[in-house]
Image (cartoon, grey):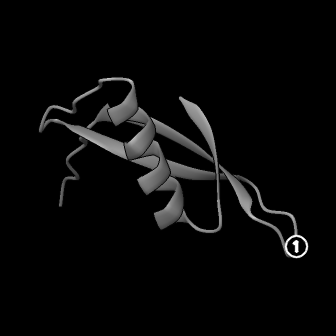
Amino acid sequence: MQIIQAPDVHGARQNYLELLERRGVSLMPSMAIYVETVHRPRGAEGSWLCYIAQVMTAAA
């Protein structure tokens, strides 16, 4: 898990992918990146919790 500063969820995900790449982490197809809001002060970039987890399938 990693806290990432970014203006939105897409920026946080991209920053996390770049961080993983710099650390030499390659994702398997069965893995997904999840991004959740930690804190978003008004008028500033937010803090986002990014983590890798197994892809979950939803039952209909």
Residue at (59%, 68%) from the top-left corner? 8
| Residue denoted by label 1 | 42
- Above/below status of 9 relative to 36: below
Above or below, 13 relative to 31: below
Q: Give the residue drawn at x 45%, y 54%.
A: 13
In percent of width and height, residue 48 lies at 63, 50
- For the view shown, which residue lies furthest in the front direction? 22
Question: On the rendered structure, is 54 left or right of 40?
Answer: left
Instruction: Pinpoint residue 46: horizontal percent, then vertical percent.
Output: 73, 59
Indicate the position of residue 56 as horizontal and vertical percent values: 25, 42
Q: Position of residue 40 (x, y in %)?
A: 78, 62
Q: Nearer the viewer, residue 18 or 8?
A: 18
Query: Is residue 57 found left or right of 14 in the rendered image?
Result: left
Q: Quadrant of the C terminus?
A: bottom left
**Badge 1: residue crowd in 10 Å (few <14, some 14–19, many ≥20):** few
Instruction: Identify whether 20 is placed above or below 7.
Output: above
Residue at 29% over, 25% down:
25
Q: Which amino acid type corresponds to the residue marked 1 in the rendered image?
A: Arg
Q: Which residue of the protein is positioned furthest toward the top in this rendering?
A: 24
For the image, the number of numbered tags is 1
Taking depth in this image into account, of 13 and 39 the one nearest to the observer is: 13
Residue 7 found in image quarter: bottom right
Q: Looking at the image, which residue is at 38% across and 44% down?
A: 17
Tell me the SS state at disc 1: loop
For residue 3, which quarter of the picture? top right
Q: Is residue 59 above or below residue 7?
A: above
Relative depth, front residue between 58 and 39: 39
Task: Residue lying at the far bottom in this picture: please name it.
Answer: 43
